[in-house]
Amino acid sequence: MKTKITELLGVKYPLLQGGMAWIADADLAAAVSNAGGVGLIAGGNAPVDYIRDQIRKARTLTDKPFGVNIMLMSPNAADLAQLVIDEKIPVVTTGAGSPGKYVPAWKEAGVKVIPVIPTVALAKRMEQAGADAVIAEGTESGGHIGENTTMCLVPQVVDAVSIPVIAAGGIADGRGIIAARALGAEGVQLGTRFLAATECNIHETYRKLVIDAKDTDSIVTGRFTGHPCRGIKTKFSRSLLKFEQNGGTPEEFEEMTVGALRKAVQDGNVAEGSFLCGAIAGMIREVKPCKDIIEELFADADRVMKEVLK
Ligand code: TUI
């Protein structure tokens, strides 16, 4: 499948791996890139030295291009923005804010800039700022989300900007890829599907929650903080929702969720962890290597396309 994204990034498949904080490390990013997609190391809230080590490790695992995702709410965002320049990273994706102030330096350094955007307005701002493409991320996604759905957001963004649009949120098989292409997207970003990749270093409890999830098993908490997050329904996430519905304060909520990503990813702590995942988790049943996931995705997409044109 050749698109403006395979051309822009020089890769076989128009597929980016989501920048999942605490999860997307060198092992996952290199495996996705080796399979012909674009792997991303997630900056999250991690210290700069850790991300530098991950970048250097990924270089020992792949000779293909991989990127870094910068979570703009991180106190380390500015230092990571410089790190990607120093390390000559070819592509950056951003989330949870506007990367406008970093774009000129990245462009100057030849870094391809692909912000995640939850609205048409932000997509237009990013195009004006010089972004090479945008990722239109629907509310079906895991983690920090906007309000609009992939189905509604992607075509509206496609109509509003001239740069290529990558669709994200609710895509986990060939049907999703073809649907995204039909909406005008030049590529897709998948996160949740890679939680069930052999190379994804999450606690077995996390992986089992994803594999066992059904269609109704994701939940959005934290709307009242201004940073809603989608994850797997557990006793803990349900209690967070009850807390906000029953008049708890955003400050107390933040306190209850401090360290919750780490507790999920590293400890598999169901009582206090936030197991972020997208609403498509119910479709994911098998753990397999990234190479198999990606090859099957695009073989399936070819099959679906032929079916649609019948
Ligand atoms: O960023 C994500 N997903 C994430 S970040 C994350 S860590 C975190 N945990 C708790 C609270 C906040 C972050 C876990 N998952 N996806 C990309 C994304 N970006 N979704 C929504 C946005 C976004 C929101 C507002 C992008 C830009 C934006 O701009 C506001 C403005 O105008 O500055």
Image (cartoon, rainbow, N blue to C red):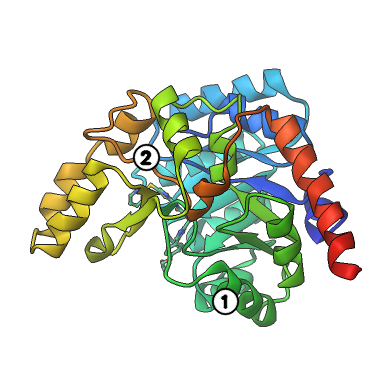
Task: Indicate the quadrant containing the C terminus: top left, top right, bottom left or bottom right.
Answer: bottom right
Precedes in sequence: disc 1 or disc 2: 1
Q: Quadrant of residue 157?
A: bottom right
Given contact means CB atoms under 8 Å apart, are the residues at marks 1 and 2 in contact? Answer: no
Judging depth in this view, the residue of 77 and 295 nearest the camera is 295
> Element type at marker 2?
loop
Residue at horizontal 55 percent and vertical 25 percent from the top: 54
Q: Which mark is residue 275?
A: 2
Tell whether 182 sits left or right of 120: right
Residue at horizontal 64 percent and vertical 81 percent from the top: 160
Marks 1/2: CA distance?
26 Å
Residue at horizontal 57 percent and vertical 42 percent from the top: 284
Mark 1 is surrounded, within 10 Å at the Cα level, by few (under 14), some (14 to 19) or many (20 or more) other residues, namely few
The residue at which mark 1 appears reads as 152
Ligand 1 image-quadrant field: bottom left
The three-letter amino acid code for the residue at tag 2 is Phe
Q: Quadrant of residue 188?
A: bottom right
Coordinates of residue 62 in the picture (x, y in percent): 73, 24
Judging depth in this view, the residue of 168 and 117 nearest the camera is 168
Judging depth in this view, the residue of 205 and 267 nearest the camera is 205
Coordinates of residue 138 in the picture (x, y in percent): 52, 64
The three-letter amino acid code for the residue at tag 1 is Cys
Q: Which mark is residue 215?
A: none
> Element type at marker 1?
helix
Coordinates of residue 186 in the picture (x, y in percent): 76, 62
Tell whether 167 sits left or right of 121: right
Mark 2 residue CB less than 8 A from any atom of ligand 1 = no
Residue 137 position (above or below residue 154): above
Coordinates of residue 182 in the picture (x, y in percent): 76, 70
Residue at horizontal 67 percent and vertical 28 percent from the top: 30
Residue 117 position (above or below residue 23): below
Q: Is residue 192 visible?
A: yes
